[in-house]
C-alpha cells in the first residue's frame, strides 16, 4: 500500500520562530490533507491540498504532486500551535485516508 | 466545529464484551469512515460506508462491523473486545459526489478495555 512519511518526528521551537513540516508519499494521490490534533484527540482540518499552495493566516501549505511531497509552514509560532500534526493522503478508488505517524510540535514561551 | 458528532466520548469495557460507537455525519455528506488510533500512532482505516453499504475495509478482523443508516449516520460495533482494542476511535464524514472529498472528523470516542 501507499507509504506516508513525515519529518521530523519531533520539533521544539521557541515562540515566534518559523518551522517547516514535511510529508513524503510513495504514489500518486487524489487528495492530501493536513490536520492538527489537539490534546483531546480532535483532528482539526488545516488544509485540503492535493496540489498547489494555500495560505490561512500564519499557516501555509504547498503540495508538489509530481514530486510526491507536501510542506506545511508555520510562521511566528505560538504556544497554542503545540500538538501533533498529521499528513493524510487519499489514494485509489475509495476515499480512505492513509496517515503518516505525525510530527509532535512543542512551542515554548 | 466540524458538524460531525460521536458518542459516547469515553467508554470503559471488560474484555470479551461488545461495544457500539455512534457517529452523526456532517450535513450534505454521504460517506462515513471509521479509524482506530492507538496511543502514539496515526489513525488506521477500519472501514468506510457509502449509501448504507461497506465500501472498503482496512486490516481489521470481522469482529469489527458497522452500519450506515438512511440519514448517513453510522455505528461501529466491536465484538469480543480485546485489551488491544483500547484506542481512540475516530469517525470521518465526507462526500463522494463531486471532486472535493475533504474529510472532517468527530471528536472521537476513547475506548478502554480492561
Image: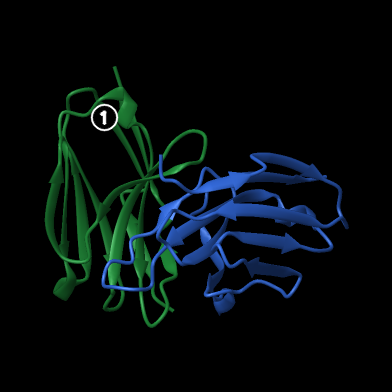
Circle 1: element type: strand
B104 or B85, which is in the foreground? B104
Judging from the image, mark 1 belongs to the subunit labelled A
Q: At which x and y percent is residue B16?
A: 88, 58
Residue of label 1: A13
Which quarter of the figure has residue A69?
bottom left
Q: Is residue B29 above or below residue B56?
A: above
Which residue is farthest front? B70
Asked if residue A25 lies left or right of residue A54, the reply is right
Q: Is residue B52 above or below residue B80?
A: below
Q: Residue at x 55, y 71 (%)?
A: B49
Q: At which x and y percent is residue B36?
A: 59, 57
Q: At which x and y percent is residue B56?
A: 53, 78
- The chain coloured green is A
The answer to whether residue A46 is visible is: yes
Which quarter of the figure has residue A58?
top left
- The chain coloured blue is B
Which residue is farthest top? A109
Q: Is residue A2 above or below residue A100?
A: below
> Crowding near pointer 1: few (<14 within 10 Å), some, many (20+)?
some
Amino acid at each position: 500500500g501507499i507509504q506516508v512519511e513525515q519529518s521530523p518526528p519531533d520539533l521544539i521551537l521557541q515562540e515566534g520562530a518559523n518551522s517547516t513540516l514535511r510529508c513524503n508519499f510513495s504514489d500518486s494521490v487524489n487528495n492530501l490533507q493536513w490536520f492538527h490534533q489537539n490534546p483531546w484527540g480532535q483532528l482539526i482540518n488545516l488544509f485540503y491540498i492535493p496540489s498547489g499552495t494555500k495560505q490561512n493566516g500564519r499557516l501555509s501549505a504547498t503540495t508538489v504532486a509530481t514530486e510526491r511531497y507536501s510542506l506545511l509552514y508555520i510562521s511566528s509560532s505560538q504556544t497554542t500551535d503545540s500538538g501533533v500534526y498529521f499528513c493524510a493522503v487519499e489514494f485509489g478508488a475509495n476515499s480512505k485516508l492513509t496517515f503518516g505517524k505525525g510530527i509532535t510540535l512543542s512551542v515554548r514561551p | 466545529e466540524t458538524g460531525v458528532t460521536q458518542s459516547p466520548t469515553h467508554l470503559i469495557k471488560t474484555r470479551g464484551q461488545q461495544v457500539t460507537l455512534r457517529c452523526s455525519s456532517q450535513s450534505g455528506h454521504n460517506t462515513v469512515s471509521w479509524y482506530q488510533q492507538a496511543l502514539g500512532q496515526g489513525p488506521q482505516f477500519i472501514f468506510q460506508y457509502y449509501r448504507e453499504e461497506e465500501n472498503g475495509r482496512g486490516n481489521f478482523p470481522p469482529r469489527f462491523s458497522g452500519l450506515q443508516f438512511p440519514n448517513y449516520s453510522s455505528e461501529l460495533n466491536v465484538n469480543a473486545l480485546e485489551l488491544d482494542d483500547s484506542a481512540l476511535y475516530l469517525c470521518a464524514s465526507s462526500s463522494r459526489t463531486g471532486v472535493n472529498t475533504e474529510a472532517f472528523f468527530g471528536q472521537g470516542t476513547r475506548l478502554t478495555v480492561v
